[in-house]
Amino acid sequence: MKRPHIVLFNPDQWRGDVLGHMGNPAAVTPNLDRFVADDAVSFRSAFCQNPVCTPSRCSFMSGWYPHVRGHRTMYHMMQPDEPVLLKTLKDEGYFVWWGGKNDLVPAKNGFDAYCDIKYTPEPKPKPPFGGDLRRGEPGSDTYYSFYVGTIGDENDGSMYYDSDWAHIMGAIDLIKNAPQDRPLCIYLPILYPHPPYAVEASWYNKIDKSHLPKRITADELTGDKPSMLSGLRERYNMQSWTEDRWTELRATYYGMCARVDHQFGLVMDALKEAGIYDDTAVFFFSDHGDFTGDYGLVEKTQNTFEDCLTRVPLIVKPPAHTPAKPRVSEALVELVDLTATVHDYAGITPGYTLFGKSLAPVIAGATDEHRDAVFSEGGRQHGEFHCNESAPANAESSMLYWPRGEMQRSEGPEHTKATMIRTGTYKYVRRHYETDELYDLERDPGETDNKIHDGSLADVLLDLKERMLDFYQTTCDVVPHTRDSREK
């Protein structure tokens, strides 16, 4: 079988609901919408396995859940003896080109095992980034907001040439000059729409702010909620923000997504011009989502699992010789399924145990049943100081991530280890040091009312706990496929 080319287009921190074809009237995503209409399957209910960057990437690049080998922090990456999809593809004869951020393997180990080229764009003068990030003074209600607004030349809306543009252009150049004797894998882990919330005026101006979905406010929350959320709200100090200010931040984020959609379209056009689009399996997906004002918060957390953080875009186009029924699929899927699906399309039999399941039958239209539950996990236990993030401990640090670091440094309940199970109708979160969470998603899709003490849901809760126990029992370890000799 001729192996397909593979494109892994991986924007950072894109919420799963900011897509036009998902019914969001404010989302400006014409390229992705057309892609799904013509050639691809978009999964409405795709979920990541950890709500921050590195643990999620370690998971979807290995097919393992974060707990399998302790990949649940920003500083514990994939080690040389662990399986990584890029390395598997390179070992199988693919020409692997990696253009973009890392957050996957320790840089000190180098990248030769994982790719043929770790692309480094030619250095260009770094453009100004909205002055001083427009943060205001320490203690102000913008100091930790991540909000910048428009960047570049606001008068003409010209392109703000940054590392994302550099890597997109590098990928297009590679497509034009691809090696003819090996299948191609392009990995594009770009930065946008990760905060700071900043975008060229030309993209910001495309967003009709009157169409933005209603924001989930902190005032709507009832019952026991994770202390991480209230602690971050206090430290972000954004309680004084009016709805108009939140709207500006949200419109900027939507503009960032529109920019990425355009860049994705350029890469697809390059594949078509090179005559290899039909022979290419394309995967568009994000590592996790973003609060973007929901619950009165920005950015993300390490151990809460609201849908805005854990539900992500996942859009797949198989090679043309493989069956596909373009549509929005209602199947419940996980990012851990990515590696298994790539293996399937590439005809690779993995030499290790992985927990993802190929999405090929769903993409072919044979079924919309894939999983009956999805899982995500994060946080740390008392004493696991090696799991903390590196934000300085001094009060009112200038680092944007200081509030999140403060919550994680605490030896109170805020940083607690936690695990989510989500079905199509309920979400249960087991929290080690504080009250668990239970949400009836049909009645409360915004997860505003914790029903953990509702006796009428006792049977539901028991079932979810049993499923979580099954999950951990069946995924708690991996036995090597090579057996040790017992002979001398």
Image: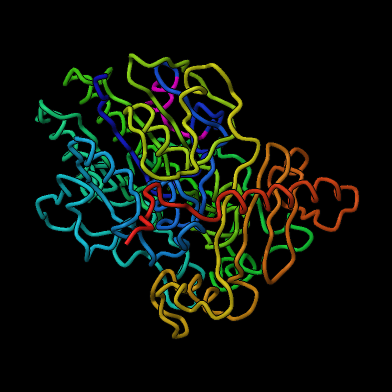
Q: Quadrant of residue 415?
A: bottom right
Q: Which image quadrant: the N terminus?
A: top left
Q: Nearer the viewer, residue 5 or 410?
A: 5
Which residue sits at x=39%, y=73%? 399
Q: Please state which of residues 239 and 265 is positioned toward the viewer in this rendering.
A: 265
**Which of the 4 image quadrants contains residue 347?**
top left
Q: Is residue 180 above or below residue 226?
A: above
Residue 401: give x, y in percent of width and height.
Answer: 43, 69
Q: Tell me the chief SS of the magenta region.
A: helix
Q: Residue furthest bottom?
A: 394
Height in image: 252 above or below 434? above
Q: Is residue 27 magenta?
A: yes
Residue at 50% over, 70% down: 404
Image spot of residue 279 (x, y percent) = 26, 20
Q: Which residues are magenta?
A: 26-36
Q: Is residue 419 left or right of residue 91?
A: right
User: Is residue 363 on the magenta stretch?
Assistant: no
Q: Residue at x 20, y 47 (%)?
A: 161
Left or right relative to 32: residue 186: left
Q: Position of residue 33 (x, y in %)?
A: 43, 24
